[in-house]
Amino acid sequence: MTFSDFKHFLLGKPFPTSMEMHERLDKVRALAVFASDPISSNAYATEAIMSVLIVLGSQALSLTLPVGLGVAGLILLVISSYIQTILHYPDGGGAYTVAKDNLGQFPSLLAAAALLTDYILTVAVSVSAGVRAVTSAFPETFDYRVHIAILAIVIITWMNLRGVRESGTVFAIPTYAFVVGVFLTIIIGLVRQYTLFGVAPLPVLEQIVPPVFSPMGFAYIWLLLRAFSGGCTALTGIEAISNGVQAFKPPEARNAVITMVAMGTMAMSLFVGILLLSSHLHLVPEEAESILSQMTRAITGNNILYYWVQFFTAAILFLAANTAYQDFPRLSSFLSNDRFMPGWMQNRGDRLVYSSGIAVLAFIAVLIVLIFQANEIAMLPLYALGVMLSFSISQTGMFRLMGRIAHLKPGESLKTLVTRIHYEKGVRWKQALNAVGAVVTFLVFIILMSTKFMEGAWIVVLIIPILVFMFYSIHHHYEQVSTALSTHDLTPDSLSEVANVVIIPIGDVHRGTLRALVYAKRISKDVRVICVINSPEMKERLLMRWKRFPKLTRRVKLITIETDYRDVITPVVKYIEQVNNSEFPDQLVTVVVPVFIPTHAVGRLLHNQTAVQLRWALQRYKDIVIIDVPIHIDSKM
């Protein structure tokens, strides 16, 4: 089986580019692909609030509901703003595109760095939270949590490499099964809470947890702000649809908006329902069992619905990472197109997905899982920080865009850097909504950064500027390359001349070196064969074989360099350098390298890599041209 056959077996047969439209997502699949992150965050957002309030004692958990409703209001505000983003930027790009169009280069790169950081953490946190759901139901698996998390990342990566449409089909089942299971649990819980239809009331679990300390004044407000910032993890992934508008079937913007509304309705309903019931049941966060698991067990008992919810909670938490798998590669491709990331991040694989971006995301996520040992609670202080910064930048950009629209008269339109805007009614109300959203999300960013800075948020605060610096460095490199390759003011006389000399480094006389010699004599009359000699026996053998082919070696200069050292690369490079600098300065010197290529991949490992090392050593010289002359060897293992 060839590598190509194995690749097709693993990932599926290649798609022609003409099938790109076929691979786009309908609304049902798109909701599963893009909404799995914000919907799944309901599994731990309420718990994130409670985990902070519990230090004030179990009595303080009564504040969970009002704090959570504040978070729900913020979700509604952000969703409303991103609907406007989708409508005005139907080509996608989200916060990066909005900032680039309205605020300039630096804010757009800041938003991109924040989002890329958040997408990486989305994979690590979601998968780790999924592992926690598994270990809650099956405590004996706790010691294998890191292995389970890495296996989940590998499987999700594999599914995404097979194509967006195929992964969307597979991931739709767990997403909708989770929503149905939790909705059914909430409905049963509400019926029992209000004792409707004569059902048994919910049990009230009076667990008394004494306060760790009793803060007063500012310290009390500080704790409430920390609880609020913890609940803001429920906002992660909301921007995903605005980044991936072009992944939808036409009409793209309309389908994206419908999906955004459906996602917001589901996420808000689940979040508020879990808030109400967990507060009524007086649940207390525990390390061994999640709040959602406790709530479902209290409402339904240990029946099939409980295990349904736990199983699909684990599944959707694992698959919530899929949101990042859609947006990290897509955003990276936008940055690459603008020359702020490596050019290969734009490349699409055989299955029409950004396979390079998918692989990079998976690799970094695995590293984070290993560092934090699949503990999502330890990662949560890093989480949501980047997305809040991007929310604030995006809505500030939309505020400015709405201001530009407000100056248009009926029938007028204006082409911006990225999109085309038209006159709209009620634009000032939309602008006010963006202003409130920008201010609130920036305040939440400040709260998150200040309350969680010492718990690990400093890592994100450090990484984001480093990424922005990396973007500028990559862009500067591409500008230098562009300048170097520019044909502006170029004349034929300014190009380097080609020296009439060819140098062939060899280790012995055999079929491969003789083939290279035949090739070299075709392109130059001055052919020099150079060999480093380590012993008299080696020199004698070389000369004997050389004399066997007088027709081929006629008018070819054989140069032997005798040395007591085992290093053969350095003497060869020194000779080539001397020829290049002294005999043919500012001219292109050609070096022909004979190369063994065994047909079997394992066979290549059995040969030394002298030719590879020589190429690496010569690449730094600007006037040296390296030509490989391969000889294929039919090796069987």
Image (cartoon, grey):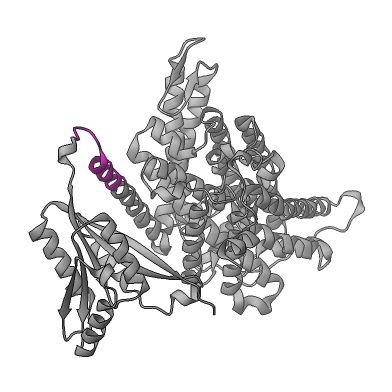
Residue 298, visible in the rendered structure: no
Residue sitting farthest toward the top: 410
Q: Main secondary structure of the magenta part?
A: helix
Residue 458 location (% of width, % of height): 37, 59
Would you say residue 319 sits in the magenta stretch?
no
Would you say residue 482 sits in the magenta stretch?
yes
Residue 533 location (% of width, % of height): 20, 82
Residue 195, visible in the rendered structure: yes
Q: Which residues are the magenta region?
A: 475-490
In the drawing, does residue 408 fall left or right of residue 56?
left
Quarter holding residue 611:
bottom left
Q: Nearer the viewer, residue 314 or 610?
A: 610
Q: Nearer the viewer, residue 325 or 482?
A: 482
Quarter holding residue 107:
top left
Q: Nearer the viewer, residue 282 or 278?
A: 278
Residue 111 location (% of width, % of height): 41, 43
Query: Above or below — where is 15 with respect to 406?
Result: below
